[in-house]
Image: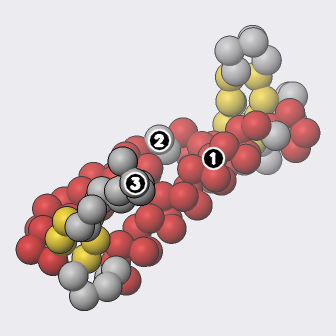
Amino acid sequence: MTGSSRLGWRFKNGTPLWFKLIVALLIANAALHFGLLSTVSKWAQSSRDALHPHRLPFMDGVNYFVPSWLGWYLDAWWIGVGLLVLLIVLLVINRGQLERDAP
């Protein structure tokens, strides 16, 4: 074998804006969830109060409390799943615009 072959798919007329936007939202959502959950011990409270009513239980038994809107977002795992499903549906709908890369 003399070189590496790159097999994949590409859009015929360049990458559309909807694809870039959905992929950027997927990456941002994953990074934000990972960042918030990995640093929760540094910024969340360990006791419930009026401003921090939402409980975030962790597997080690520690409970942290965050504002309701942030708790809603951290519990919304379906955002990433929904974006991925939307991306797949749009790729299927626009499959005529896709072509296989030549090796």
Task: State the SS at label 2.
Answer: loop
First in residue order: circle 2 vs circle 3: 3
Q: Earlier in the sequence, mark 1 or mark 2?
A: 1
Mark 3–mark 1 CB contact (< 8 Å):
no
Decide: is 75 above or below 8: above
Disc 1 is placed on an element classified as helix
Say which residue label 3 marks.
2
Disc 2 marks which residue?
A: 77
Residue shown at the point (49%, 44%) measured from the top left:
76
Circle 3 — which element?
A: loop
Say what amino acid the circle numbered 1 marks. Answer: His
- Give the residue pinned by disc 1: 33
Residue located 75% across and 11% down the image: 61
Q: CA distance from mark 2 to mark 3?
A: 45 Å
Please state the horizontal and vertical placement of residue 58, each as a whole percent of the image. Answer: 70, 21
Residue 32 location (% of width, % of height): 65, 53
| Colour setting | secondary structure
Q: Is residue 102 left or right of residue 17?
A: left
